[in-house]
Image (cartoon, rainbow, N blue to C red):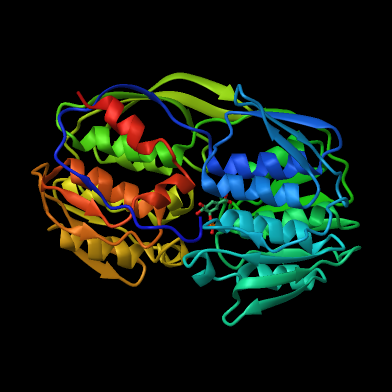
Amino acid sequence: MTDHNATPRSFSASAPLQGRIRIPGDKSISHRSLMLSALAIGESRVTGLLEGHDVLATAAAMRAMGADIERRDDGEWRIHGVGVGGLLQPREALDMGNSGTSTRLLMGLVASHPITVTFTGDASLSGRPMGRVIDPLSQMGADISASPGGRLPLMVRGLAPAIPLSYRLPMASAQVKSAVLLAGLNTPGITEVIEPVPTRDHSERMLKGFGATLEVEVEPDGTRWISIMGEAELKPQTIVVPGDPSSAAFFIVAALVVPGSDVTIANVGLNPTRAGLVEVLRAMGGDIELLDAREVGGEPVADLRVRHSALQGIEVDPAIVPSMIDEFPILFVAAALAEGRTVTTGLDELRVKESDRLAVMATGLKAIGVRVEESEDGLVIDGTGGEPLPGGATIAGHLDHRICMSFAVAGLVSKTPVTIDDIAPVATSFPNFEALLTGLQP
Ligand code: S3P
């Protein structure tokens, strides 16, 4: 997964997208379901697990640390955990591929176990900052030696018993929050995370579901105090993973911008900490209907019927950013097709994702003829009002799945095809993206 031959792929103007698709499992929830199952004593069962490279890297890591993880032919995963405190020393370095979530959450788990683990990753992951987890985990007693700049490869020497911590998040990051909470699982006493800006709460929901004593208090200004009682005993669970709203996002926008489209996207997770894109696209005039709202695996889920719509530019409130942090690349494509100007701010975290998503999107959008200005923390985009984009460029995807899929959607509404230099990264989060797209075309 770290080295591969680049596979270029072109996307061209599409006929109306029509039909019904089912979105694969949520990446965040899939990682967590493997990690917590691997720490429970007894057999957990997981269905709907996302089988993308990132989640498979987590599965391989948990196996290397002693869990028994098996995929049955019917797609159900069965996991026999080692118990909190029971992780074993892996024999080799853990290759995290492209996955920041695997790396940061597993660093948290290792930090409070008496084992030493080396983490490696691909070129994208090796450029991403790990200082944000190294800081709190070092305060809990882990000894971490990183490459220059707090990067991978790095080695975590865990400490057991670790030292409980009360940690105020310096940035809105569910990965940092989760790393500290997961370290707290095997730490005596109470470990606490103070979160001034709420981020995705899948760790909190699932830790509670597995029987950990976790409490959340919310201050009037929205600050969340999350505390976990350590040396927890986790009970095995049966988990149904809902569909990933961050994957659905590409088809929501594709259906909105390709003229004549009418697509139903089944099984979309709509946890309020993840659903910002739907709100923003509706405010832009997007016709998105929620059908059969229900609960799956303790998370709100619905089917979405999305029809082609004339979109209006919008000023996106920075307060909504954490609930759609991964959806900005595809929102920028929607903005490129909208009438008038879209202004985004407060997006500095986009610069440290799988790529610098502000710079890479600005460069790519300019190359296909979009009027875009990049600021320090956002993009300003003047849309075409529904006219097709010029297209006709090859886009550097920088090993970033969401960049690749965003420009694939842009290609569907371009006069001249848009080529992605390497489509392979899509398999980290959405292996059947192209198959689902082809299935919606006549
Ligand atoms: C994730 C948190 C977010 C998100 C990432 C998945 C998670 O990262 O961008 O795709 O599963 O906790 P940050 O914590 O860096 O914001």
Q: How many marks?
A: 0
Which residue is situated farthest in the front direction here?
Answer: 5
Residue closer to the observer: 118 or 188: 118
Q: Residue at x 12, y 58 (%)?
A: 369
For this view, does 247 lie left or right of residue 163? left
The quarter in which the C terminus is drawn is top left
Q: Residue at x 62, y 24 (%)?
A: 73
Q: Residue at x 34, y 43 (%)?
A: 280
Residue 118 image offset from top left, x and y in percent:
70, 67
Q: Residue at x 48, y 37 (%)?
A: 244
Which residue is situated farthest in the bottom direction here?
Answer: 148
Give residue 83's quadrant in the image.
top right
Which residue is situated farthest in the top direction here?
Answer: 292
Residue closer to the observer: 199 or 179: 179
- Confirm whether residue 144 shows in the render: yes
Give residue 358's quadrant in the image.
bottom left
Residue closer to the observer: 146 or 301: 146
- Confirm whether residue 320 shows in the render: no
For this view, does 183 lie left or right of residue 308? right
Is residue 33 shown above or below 383?
above
For this view, does 308 lie left or right of residue 133? left
For this view, does 261 lie left or right of residue 288? left
Residue 402 image offset from top left, x and y in percent:
38, 51
Residue 415 image offset from top left, x and y in percent:
8, 46
Is residue 377 shown above or below 428?
below
Residue 394 image offset from top left, x and y in percent:
20, 58
